[in-house]
Structure formats: structure tokens, C-alpha cells
Amino acid sequence: MSGGPADPARAQAGGPPQDRAAFGGFWRRVLALLIDGVLLGIPLTVAQAMISPETLHTEEWTDADTAWTFVNLLVGWFYFAGMHSSQYRATIGKMAVGLRVVDWHGERISFARATGRHFAEILSGLLFMIGYLMVAFTRQRRALHDFIAETWVVRREWLDE
């Protein structure tokens, strides 16, 4: 990661930038998640409607509902962990709003770390989404799952790309 305009000494010190503006803020991250939700939700719903439409409007839980839940979990895991650990360091939603997920040095994270980050989001959602709300109140705009996985969500312009 580069030091960015507000932190020229960052390159020598190592680690994330010190300027709060270098990080992905709460609303930018919400918008990215909404974009990703639409990009995943529409194709998965269409596939489910084509393959087993009876699962879309049932009152009883069936084995088919369990199968679709498993498919949705797998697709979400591979999408989020795969994109965050890819050369892009971001999902399509994060790319659209100019964000990247990086490690302490501003580098790409591993698939294992991205997987841990993805499943740590379950904790962020517990207790009324407080883990997500932490983004608005922490200096480096980190959510609980960022702390757990030791990741930072930064604005693209703060990286050496």
C-alpha cells in the first residue's frame, strides 16, 4: 500500500495508512454489499426457480430447501473468499465502489484468510449487527470480521496498483 497523500511516512513505517480517509467507510461498504447481493441473488433465485420452483413458496421445510440453502452458502463462500483472495482483492461490489481487502502490508490475502473473514461475518451479524457497525466507529473503519481475520478494507487509490 502506498502512504497516500496524507501519510508520506507510511512506506517507511509499514502497516496500514494512518489517515482515516484511506479506509472504506460504512456506507461505501454497505453499497458494495448491496451490489454483491444483487449479483448473487438474482442468478441464484433464477436457477432455483428453473430447477425446483416448488422450493420458492413452501410453508414446510423440505430436503430441497436444505439443498438450496447449502448451494447458496457454497456459492457465497466461494464468491466472497475467492474474489477477496484474487488478484483483484475485492468483490465486484467492492471494485465498483473503489475498495480493496488487504493484509497489514497492503497485499492480497490468502484464500484461507478470506474464508476465515467470510465466516467471521456471522459473528459480525450477531447481536444486532454490532460487528458491522464497528466500521463507523473505529479509526481504521474495521468491522469485527476484519479484526478477526487481520484484514483492512482500503480505498483503491491508496494502493500501489
Image (spheres, helix red, strand yellow):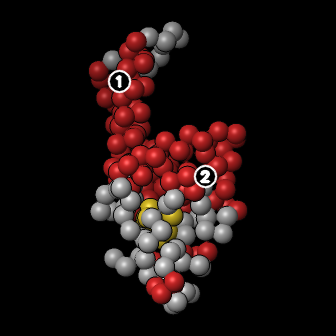
Kindly indicate the quadrant of the structure image that contains residue 73: top left
| Secondary structure beneath label 2 | helix
In this view, the mark in front (2 or 1): 2
Q: Can you identify the residue that label 1 sits on? A: 49
Kindly indicate the quadrant of the structure image that contains residue 121: top right
Q: Position of residue 159 (x, y in %)?
A: 41, 76
Q: Position of residue 131 (x, y in %)?
A: 64, 49
| Secondary structure beneath label 1 | helix
Q: Position of residue 115 (x, y in %)?
A: 41, 46
Kindly indicate the quadrant of the structure image that contains residue 72: top left
Q: State the residue in front, 155 or 124.
A: 124
Image quarter in which the N terminus is found:
bottom left
Q: Is residue 79 above or below residue 54?
A: below
Distance from Cα at disc 2 to Cα at disc 1:
35 Å
Image quarter in which the C terminus is found:
bottom left
Task: Name which residue lies at 54% across and 56% down.
Answer: 146
Q: Is residue 23 above or below residue 113?
A: below
* Number of other residues with Cα within 10 Å of mark 1, as a class: few under 14, some 14 to 19, many 20 or more: few
Task: Name which residue lies at 59% across and 60% down.
Answer: 142
Looking at this view, name the residue that lies furthest to the front: 13
Three-letter residue code for mark 2: Leu
Q: Can you identify the residue that label 2 sits on? A: 144
Mark nearer the N terminus (2 vs 1): 1
* Left or right, residue 113 beside residue 153: left
Whether residue 111 is visible, yes or no, is yes
